[in-house]
Image: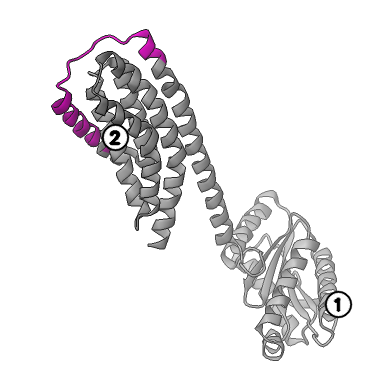
């Protein structure tokens, strides 16, 4: 209900200014068509009310309603009804009538598509029917030059304003869609790619390496004794450690490297076009820098990283085997003392290229 109310208020605010412009310019158009017919005073009062006061009443009506979205749709049907009423009152004068019909149709399509166009058309027909009963009009086949010029502002300016409103709405929706897409692809705590998105990128990199016959490496990173950090210092401190590692990965890796949070206290990195020995040096520098930074933040907090590295193997059938190599190297790093970088060698027997206990 709250979401619908916010959507309704947004619609009401968006239509407020366009309704003011539309009915004000419509007042000029209808007045020029009605003047030669010498209408009764009450007709002039109704025209003035419709052109000058109705937009403000409609906005307040929607704003104060318990369901603003539905109230604004009701207001749009009232607009269409009054448009049909004035078509009959103008004796079906061709240009003012066509202008009124086309502007109403454009407005209804922009707001609610074909469904609301049909609803607005039905309301217009009802308005025409009421006008026929009151005015018993005859068809006036000619439009005077004055009436032509009176229609031009509505024909020129209202579509421009409505187009601008639709553009802004489309721009806002596009931005929100991009933001939602980014949220669905990233880990909320660290800002890195989430598990699923990173694995998609791994598949892309695997296929690129096979296609271009190039190498690369991937790294799996595990924060040593992370549960003990949570138990000793609390989950807030644990979140700080996770965010800090995510920040370091974003700041100290190359622009072409792809870092993600694999899950829990485990992180993952794709290092395109990087030989295994150079990838090991990069990870060792990261391991050392991370431990130093955590110590500076909290001298009692001793944090290490276990890192498993694997190079691209053209003999692998799919990317999961590449990931398995890195996972085996990470397991070796954790079981052989932790806080070290272990590389999976060509014969798949993990070996410590860099060993820092």
Q: What's the image's color scheme?
A: one colour
Q: Give the range drawn in magenta.
A: 120-149
- Given residues 234 and 330, the one toward you in this image is 234
Residue shown at 57% from the left, 54% from the top: 179
**Residue 56 percent across, percent down from the top left:** 40, 42
Examine the image and state in which quarter residue 74 appears.
top left
SS for callout 2: helix
Examine the image and state in which quarter residue 76 appears.
top left
**Residue 219 percent across, percent down from the top left:** 72, 69
SS for callout 1: helix
- Given residues 45 and 167, the one toward you in this image is 45
Examine the image and state in which quarter residue 59 appears.
top left
Q: Distance between the residues labelled 2 and 1?
A: 70 Å
Query: Which quarter of the figure is the C terminus placed in?
Result: bottom right
Figure disc tally: 2
Mark 2 lies on residue: 80
Image mark for residue 292: 1
Q: Does the magenta stretch include residue 92?
A: no
On the picture, is 214 further left or further right than 119? right
Residue furthest front as drawn: 41
Mark 2, Cα crowd under 10 Å, few <14 / some 14-19 / many 20+, is many
Residue shown at 81% from the left, 69% from the top: 280
Residue shown at 70% from the left, 75% from the top: 242
Closer to the chain start, of discs 2 and 1, is: 2
Query: Which quarter of the figure is the N terminus placed in?
Result: bottom left
Residue shown at 55% from the left, 55% from the top: 181
State whether the magenta stretch is mostly helix, strand or loop: helix
């Amino acid at each position: 209900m709250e979401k619908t109310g916010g959507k309704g208020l947004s619609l009401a605010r968006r239509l407020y200014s366009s309704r003011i412009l539309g009915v004000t310019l419509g007042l000029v158009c209808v007045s020029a068509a009605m003047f030669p017919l010498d209408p009764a005073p009450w007709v002039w009062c109704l025209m003035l009310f419709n052109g000058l006061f109705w937009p403000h009443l409609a906005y307040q009506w929607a704003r104060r309603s318990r369901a603003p979205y539905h109230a604004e749709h009701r207001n749009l049907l009232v607009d269409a009804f009054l448009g049909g009423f004035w078509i009959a009152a103008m004796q079906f004068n061709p240009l003012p009538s066509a202008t009124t019909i086309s502007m109403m149709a454009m407005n209804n399509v922009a707001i609610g598509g074909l469904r609301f166009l049909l609803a607005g058309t039905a309301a217009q027909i009802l308005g025409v029917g009421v006008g026929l009963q009151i005015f018993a009009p005859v068809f006036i086949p000619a439009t005077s030059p004055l009436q032509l010029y009176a229609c031009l502002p509505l024909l020129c300016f209202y579509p421009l304003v409505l187009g601008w409103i639709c553009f802004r709405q489309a721009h806002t929706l596009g931005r929100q869609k991009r933001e939602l897409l980014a949220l669905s692809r990233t880990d909320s705590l660290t800002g890195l790619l989430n598990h699923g998105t990173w694995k998609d990128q791994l598949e892309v990199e695997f296929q690129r390496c096979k296609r271009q016959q190039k190498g690369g490496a991937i790294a799996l990173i595990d924060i040593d004794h992370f549960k003990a950090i949570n138990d000793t210092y609390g989950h807030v401190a644990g979140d700080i450690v996770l965010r800090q590692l995510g920040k370091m990965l974003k700041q100290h890796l190359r622009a072409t490297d792809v870092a993600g949070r694999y899950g829990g206290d485990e992180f993952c990195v794709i290092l395109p076009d990087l030989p295994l020995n150079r990838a090991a040096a990069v990870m060792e520098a990261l391991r050392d820098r991370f431990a130093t930074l955590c110590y500076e933040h909290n001298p009692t907090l001793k944090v290490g990283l276990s890192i498993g590295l694997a190079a691209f193997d053209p003999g692998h059938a799919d990317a999961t085997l590449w990931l398995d190599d890195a996972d085996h190297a990470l397991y070796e790093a954790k079981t052989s003392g932790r806080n070290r970088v272990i590389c999976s060698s060509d014969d798949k027997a993990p070996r410590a290229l860099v060993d820092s206990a």
